[in-house]
C-alpha cells in the first residue's frame, strides 16, 4: 500500500485520537482500543519504510497516548486505601448473613455462659481450672502498675505477645473455615465462651469488675470485630467448596478467596491494631477508668459506623 492511501485510510483514526488527547472527545473510555490501532499503524509505517515525517508523527502520538494511559500516577487508584475504605466495608455488608451468624456464635455463647456463671458461679470451674480463675482475679486487682498482666513484662514485650496471640487466633479461625466452615464457627464460639467465663467471674467481684471492663472495652472493639471477620471469611470459603454451583471447586475457591481478600486483610489489620491498643493503652494504670470507658465507647461507635456507612455509593 502506498503512503498516500495509508494516510487516507487512517486519517480519521489519528484525528479522533488527537481530539481525545486534547480533551475534545466525548468518550475517553475508547482511548485504549484506539491506542492499540495506533500502535499497529506505527508498526506498519516502520515496516513499510514510509517517510520519516509520518513515522515521527505517529511516534509522538503513540507517546502521548502512552503517557495519558500509564504515565500519570496521581490518577491511579491507591489499591490498599480502596480496599480499606470501600471494598472492605462493602463486602462485609454484602455478607451480612454470615456476619450475623458469627455474631450470634460469639456474643450468644458469651452471654449464655456469662449468665450461667453469674447466677451459679460454681459452674465457672467446669470451664476453667481453679488456678486459672485465681490468676484472672489477680491480674485485675486495683493498684497494679499494669492491669491485665500476670507478670512484670514491659509494654513492648507484651505488644509482641498480643500480636502473636491475636493474629494467630484470627488466622486459625480463618483457616478452619476451609473444612465446611464448621471449625471456624466453633473457634468463634469457643472464644465467646472464654470471654463469657472471665467476664462473669470478674464482674461478680466489685474489686475487679471495673478493672476488667475498662481494660477490655477499647481494644475489644477492633479485636472482636477482626475475629468475627476472620471467621466470616473462613466460612465463606468453606461454603464455596460445599456449594460451588456451576463452577469447579477449584475455580469457586479461587474466586471466593479473591472476593474475600479485602475482608481477611482488614480483619488482620484490626487484630494488629488491637494488640497495639491492648499493650500501650488498655494495660496502663495511669489512665483513669472513666477515660477508658469514654474512649472505648467511642471506638465501638466508630467501628459500627464504619461498617454501616463507609464506601456507600463509591463502588
Image (tube, grey):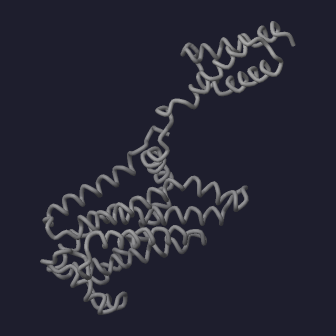
Q: In front: 213, or 119? A: 213
Q: Position of residue 275 (x, y in %)?
A: 34, 66
The relative height of residue 274 versus residue 190 in the rendered view (above or below) is above
Picture quadrant where residue 126 is located: bottom left
Picture quadrant where residue 37 is located: top right
Q: In front: 79, or 312? A: 79
Q: Is residue 297 left or right of residue 18?
A: left
Residue at coordinates 21% horizontally, 58% vertically from top-left?
295
Residue at coordinates 32% horizontally, 69% vertically from top-left?
159
Q: Position of residue 284 (x, y in %)?
A: 19, 69
Residue at coordinates 15% horizontally, 66% vertically from top-left?
289
The relative height of residue 88 versus residue 197 in the rendered view (above or below) is above
* Residue extending furthest toward the right: 1
Q: Quadrant of the N terminus?
A: top right
Q: Position of residue 76 (x, y in %)?
A: 51, 35
The relative height of residue 66 versus residue 223 in the rendered view (above or below) is above
Q: Position of residue 248 (x, y in %)?
A: 73, 59
Q: Is residue 132 left or right of residue 259?
A: left
* Residue extending furthest toward the front: 52
The relative height of residue 18 versus residue 314 in the rendered view (above or below) is above
User: How many labels were placed on the picture?
Assistant: 0
Q: In front: 254, or 106? A: 254
Residue at coordinates 43% horizontally, 43% vertically from top-left?
311
Amino acid at each position: 500500500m502506498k503512503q498516500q492511501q495509508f494516510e487516507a485510510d487512517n486519517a480519521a483514526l489519528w484525528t479522533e485520537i488527537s481530539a481525545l488527547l486534547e480533551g475534545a472527545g466525548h468518550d475517553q473510555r475508547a482511548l485504549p482500543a484506539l491506542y492499540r490501532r495506533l500502535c499497529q499503524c506505527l508498526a506498519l509505517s516502520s515496516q513499510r519504510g514510509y517517510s520519516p515525517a509520518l513515522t515521527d508523527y505517529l511516534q509522538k502520538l503513540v507517546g502521548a497516548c502512552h503517557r495519558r494511559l500509564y504515565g500519570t500516577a496521581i490518577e491511579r487508584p491507591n489499591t490498599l486505601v480502596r480496599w480499606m475504605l470501600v471494598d472492605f466495608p462493602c463486602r462485609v455488608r454484602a455478607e451480612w448473613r454470615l456476619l450475623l451468624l458469627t455474631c450470634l456464635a460469639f456474643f450468644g455463647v458469651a452471654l449464655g455462659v456469662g449468665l450461667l456463671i453469674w447466677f451459679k458461679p460454681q459452674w465457672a470451674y467446669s470451664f476453667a481450672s481453679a488456678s486459672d480463675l485465681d490468676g484472672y482475679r489477680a491480674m485485675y486487682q486495683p493498684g497494679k502498675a499494669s492491669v491485665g498482666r500476670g507478670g512484670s513484662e514491659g509494654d513492648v514485650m507484651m505488644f509482641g505477645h498480643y500480636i502473636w496471640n491475636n493474629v494467630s487466633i484470627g488466622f486459625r479461625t480463618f483457616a478452619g473455615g476451609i473444612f465446611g466452615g464448621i471449625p471456624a464457627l466453633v473457634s468463634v464460639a469457643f472464644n465467646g465462651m472464654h470471654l463469657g467465663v472471665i467476664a462473669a467471674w470478674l464482674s461478680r467481684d466489685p474489686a475487679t469488675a471495673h478493672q476488667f471492663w475498662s481494660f477490655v472495652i477499647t481494644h475489644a472493639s477492633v479485636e472482636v470485630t477482626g475475629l468475627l471477620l476472620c471467621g466470616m471469611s473462613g466460612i465463606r470459603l468453606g461454603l464455596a467448596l460445599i456449594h460451588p454451583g456451576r463452577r469447579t471447586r477449584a475455580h469457586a475457591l479461587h474466586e471466593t478467596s479473591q472476593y474475600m481478600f479485602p475482608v481477611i486483610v482488614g480483619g488482620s489489620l484490626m487484630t494488629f491494631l488491637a494488640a497495639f491498643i491492648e499493650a500501650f493503652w488498655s494495660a496502663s494504670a495511669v489512665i483513669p477508668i472513666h477515660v477508658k470507658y469514654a474512649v472505648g465507647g467511642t471506638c465501638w461507635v466508630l467501628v459500627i459506623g464504619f461498617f454501616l456507612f463507609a464506601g456507600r455509593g463509591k463502588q
